[in-house]
Image: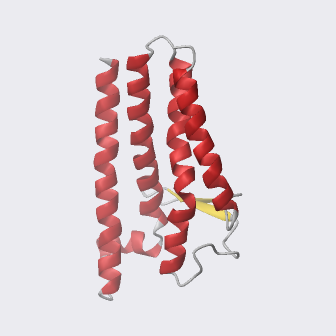
Amino acid sequence: METVIYIILSILLIASTHIWSAIKSGCFYSVSRGQKPDMLKKYINNLHYVQTPFWYSLFGAFGVILFALFRLMHPDDIWTNLASAYLIAQGTSTMAGPFYQGFINVGCGLPFIDPNEKKEVELANPVSGKTRWFKKFWYGKNRIYLAFVGLIMIVLGIILIFQNH
């Protein structure tokens, strides 16, 4: 039954990525037509209201699927399963960082790696309408270095899940 719960959760998270992606596409299409429909205005005014939950849904689903798989492989080792799933899912996100921000930069008319990138990140909650800014260390060229850290996280997660088993 535990695995079924994880599968259902990951299905819901994956479905939500499709919804968030549709909202984002709607924003781009409406702005390209010079319009701001009421239903999309909040997201157009601050794209983080759609991007933050999309990112959490995408990598959350991946992490839950990995955790479910690892629980099936090693049912008595919950903490190793959890750590491995986190390392691999977060490492995958981190490894993609330069490309994620790079293509956004290009779309904004900036260089792929922007030396003047903000040193803060905004997390936005579309339900409450609240946002919060945090200092970040993954800006500019640091994103490239962190991509390698992401790869190391993935390798460590794989080693951890298969050690002593």
Residue ID at (34%, 74%): 27
Q: Would you place residue 17 above or below residue 156 in this image?
A: below
Is 101 left, or right, of 9 in this rendering?
Answer: right
Q: Residue 133 placed where, x, y %?
A: 64, 60
- Is residue 138 visible to the viewer in this orientation of the structure? no
What is the quadrant of the N terminus in the image?
top left
Residue ID at (32%, 46%): 14
Is 87 left, or right, of 74 in this rendering?
Answer: right
Q: Would you place residue 90 above or below residue 38 in this image?
A: above
- Is residue 6 visible to the viewer in this orientation of the structure? yes
Quadrant of res 139: bottom right
Quadrant of res 110: bottom right
Q: Would you place residue 54 above or below residue 111 in this image?
A: above
Residue ID at (35%, 82%): 31
Q: Residue 66 placed where, x, y %?
A: 42, 32
Q: What is the basis of the colouring in this image?
A: secondary structure
Q: Would you place residue 113 above or below residue 165 in this image?
A: below
In front of the other: 27 or 111: 111
Q: Residue 35 placed where, x, y %?
A: 31, 85
| Outermost residue toward the top in this view | 76
Q: How many dots with numbers?
A: 0
In front of the other: 161 or 18: 161
Q: Residue 161 placed where, x, y %?
A: 52, 24
Is 29 left, or right, of 156 in this rendering?
Answer: left
